[in-house]
Amino acid sequence: MVSPAIALAFLPLVVTLIIRYRHHFVLLYRAVLVRIVQDCVTGLTREERAFQYVLTHATPGDPQGILDVFDHWCSKVEFISNIGPKKGLVLDKLLKENCPLTVLELGTHCGYSTIRIARCLPLGARLFSVEMDERNALVAEKIIRLAGFDDDTVELIVSPSDEVIPKLREDYGVERLDFVFMDHWKRCYLPDLQLLEGSGLLGQGTIILADNVIFPGAPNFLRYIKHSGLYRYRVHRASLEYIRGIQDGMAELVYLGTK
């Protein structure tokens, strides 16, 4: 048994750690503990609960209204790691400035960023959104259609990203990607980027935006883009969505072409 004197000696260190990482404890509580309790109480997944909230509070056919309701749920009710409203402005700006016609999203989750992208696209543009989790994809499909986007604008592909990318040309008629948004498993960022390079779908000027490269982080991805010589890049610094005090960032890449 630890003596009171030893416990007392470690107390300042414990207090310091709690204060220093208080935002991480808040994230743990909101993202994990609340989710476990609500899963047990409701019998629904967190994404299904979010959809029920959006369905109740948002107006069908109003993409911005649906995003606003989603943001309120994520900040006040339960945490979901969407890109969020603040980092979302960077995504909006890039889309509006570049007017991409063919967009690939890796990581649909429950459709928040899909709606955010689709509402900024020019007439005739096409968004291919890839989600490997079938249950999340069912939720995303409902939310995307609730926002008013049909299959001609947003095509949801339910499959792992590393299986979809090599088939985009043959199965979906994609010749070139103008814009890629990455927000799936961070460990997949680098291998999927290299798959895109090998597929020939990246053209000179293709823009790639990767979220959460600081937290939880994608160090191998950042190291690769820095040393590959294939990209002009910058990191947009920001806080983690819906949680103050945790530093995060998005990597913006512009493909320069093969060496």
Image (cartoon, rainbow, N blue to C red):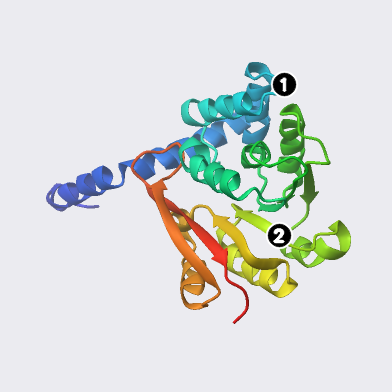
Q: Nearer the viewer, mark 1 or mark 2?
A: 2
Quarter residue 115 falls in: top right
Q: How crowded is mark 1: few (under 14 residues within 10 Å), some or many (20 or more)?
A: some
Estimate the x, y position of residue 119 in percent, counting from the top left: 66, 36
Dot 2 amino acid type: Leu
Q: Name the residue under label 2.
A: 177
Q: In this view, does 110 lie above or below 235?
A: above
What is the secondary structure assignment of the residue under circle 2? strand
Estimate the x, y position of residue 69 in percent, counting from the top left: 57, 24
Q: Residue at (51%, 77%) from the top-left corner?
A: 229
Estimate the x, y position of residue 192 in percent, counting from the top left: 65, 66
Between 15 and 162, the one lying in front of the other is 162
User: How far is the residue under mark 1 from the one under mark 2?
Assistant: 30 Å
Dot 1 amino acid type: Pro
Q: Residue 60 carries which label?
A: 1
Q: Residue at (25%, 49%) from the top-left corner?
A: 17
User: Residue most toward the bottom?
Assistant: 259
What is the secondary structure assignment of the residue under circle 1? loop
Between 102 and 147, the one lying in front of the other is 102
Q: Which mark is residue 175?
A: none
Quarter residue 144 falls in: top right
